[in-house]
Image (spheres, rainbow, N blue to C red):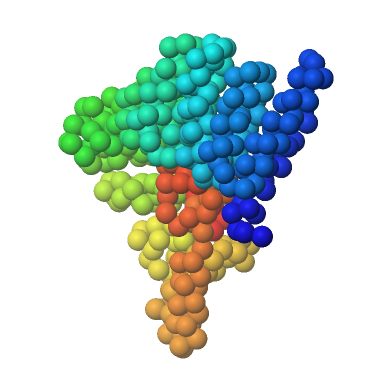
């Protein structure tokens, strides 16, 4: 059997399933339509795509009740990556002079999906806008426009559309809008426009009070300005937004406390943080703070006691490094430290809470499922 015939089998099966679900008002008409459908399917199986499409388009013009079968055939082609065939189906439908207006928006949406799949964003954008002209309430068209603007990094247009959908789903759309404003804030930061950076970050927080990214932008700016006290206050407020995300700012937080010569206060804060959030493994961080404020021996004593009750790979690695340096352990300790370091390097540092995508790099937008703010530190690894 030729390879192409194997590829077309799913299309034929899907089409046959739809055929037997099609409801006709007259038996004679049903018989005629069935005959024509099988004729079209025969063309498909013989890889005569042009002839098959001609049959199906003529069929739908004589009976628009069969249009759902064309939508499904188009979706099958699109799913298989055959965008040219899906486009031809929907272009053929939209070009029919007898097309009932009630189907026009649906066909435009399907054609828009075809163009998105083909990477023709400009054409898809035009179609989704045309859908909104005919149906201003089409949330499907608005969501697709958002995806296009997001792909093109046109954050202003994305915000305009997303704001219209905010009342429909505040929790989801609020988070998206907040990240769009954070993208604008990042651009302002790179331009050195600090006033606009802060403006966009505050707007982000108005749409999503739990937007960690906006808080980090504001805190980083306070830190860069030399206002360590305000920076600390904002960094520590992240605990109320999402405690796990504090891992992202611990280095910056430590720098602020060091600038204020207040590492003992940081030590107390980290201990209280650890007691409030048992799933945060802060042993190596606390040991580093102890080392700087009270010396290596204090850090060693802390880790030796802590690891017995709460085993941690980074904590063990940190302890081994101290023993290797201070106690003069033999090569075994050095080798063990190297192995632990390699294991830590290969571990998963971040995981998407929506789709489970694992990565060693932090992303605000998940590369796998395109959810904003869902990639978070894997606290059990830290």
Q: Is 245 left, or right, of 149 in this rendering?
A: right
Q: Quadrant of residue 106?
A: top right
Residue at image position (69%, 30%) is: 36
Kindly give the residue lying farthest to the right in the view shown: 27
Residue drawn at the location 42% of the way across and 54% of the way down: 361
Q: Quadrant of the N terminus?
A: bottom right
Based on the displayed image, in which of its 4 quarters is residue 66 positioned? top right
Residue 300 x %, y %: 47, 69
Looking at the picture, how far across and down is residue 84, in whole percent?
47, 40
Residue 243 shows in the view = no
Q: Report how many numbered discs are placed on residues in the image.
A: 0
The residue closer to the viewer here, 266 or 37, is 37
Judge whether 325 appears above or below 70 on screen: below
Q: Dividing the picture into quarters, in which one does residue 299 lie?
A: bottom left
Q: Is residue 291 visible?
A: yes
- x and y percentages locating residue 251 in the rendered image: 36, 52
Give the vertical position of 300 relative to 379 (above or below): below
Residue nearest the observer in this picture, 269 or 373: 373
Q: Is residue 98 above or below residue 119?
A: above
Q: Residue 356, image x and y in percent?
A: 58, 49
User: Farthest residue in the bottom direction?
Assistant: 330
Q: Residue at x 42, y 17 (%)?
A: 130
The answer to whether residue 69 is left or right of residue 31 is left
Q: Nearer the viewer, residue 280 or 34?
A: 34
In terms of depth relative to the viewer, which is nearer, 201 or 352?
352
Q: Residue at x 37, y 33 (%)?
A: 121
């Amino acid at each position: 059997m030729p390879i192409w015939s194997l590829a077309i089998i799913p299309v034929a099966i899907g089409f046959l399933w739809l055929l037997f679900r099609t409801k006709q008002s007259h038996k004679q008409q049903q018989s005629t339509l069935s005959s024509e459908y099988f004729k079209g399917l025969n063309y498909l199986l013989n890889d005569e795509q042009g002839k098959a499409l001609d049959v199906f388009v003529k069929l739908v013009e004589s009976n628009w009740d069969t249009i759902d079968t064309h939508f499904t055939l188009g979706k099958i082609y699109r799913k298989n990556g055959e965008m040219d065939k899906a486009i031809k189906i929907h272009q053929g439908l939209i070009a029919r002079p007898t097309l009932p207006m009630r189907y026009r928006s649906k066909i435009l949406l399907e054609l828009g999906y075809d163009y998105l799949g083909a990477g023709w964003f400009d054409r898809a954008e035009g179609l989704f806008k045309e859908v909104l002209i005919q149906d201003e309430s089409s949330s499907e068209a608005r969501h697709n426009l958002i995806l296009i603007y997001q792909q093109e990094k046109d954050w202003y247009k994305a915000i305009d559309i997303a704001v219209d959908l905010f009342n429909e789903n505040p929790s989801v759309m609020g988070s998206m809008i907040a990240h769009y404003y954070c993208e604008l804030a990042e651009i302002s930061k790179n331009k050195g426009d600090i006033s606009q950076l802060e403006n966009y970050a505050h707007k982000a927080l108005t749409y999503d009070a739990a937007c960690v990214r906006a808080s980090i932008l504001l805190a980083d700016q306070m830190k860069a300005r030399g206002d360590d006290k305000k920076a600390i206050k904002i960094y520590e407020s992240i605990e109320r937004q999402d405690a796990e995300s504090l891992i992202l700012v611990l280095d910056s937080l430590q720098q602020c406390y060091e600038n204020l010569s207040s590492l003992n206060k940081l030590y107390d804060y980290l201990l209280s943080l650890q007691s409030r959030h048992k799933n945060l493994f802060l042993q190596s961080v606390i040991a580093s703070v102890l080392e700087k404020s009270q010396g290596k021996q204090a850090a060693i004593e802390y880790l030796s006691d802590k690891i017995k009750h709460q085993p941690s790979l980074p904590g063990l690695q940190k302890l081994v490094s101290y023993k290797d340096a201070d106690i003069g352990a033999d090569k075994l300790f050095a080798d063990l430290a190297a192995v632990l370091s390699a294991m830590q390097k290969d571990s998963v540092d971040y995981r998407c809470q929506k789709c489970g995508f694992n990565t060693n790099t932090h992303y605000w937008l998940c590369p796998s499922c395109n959810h904003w703010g869902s990639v978070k530190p894997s606290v059990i690894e830290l």
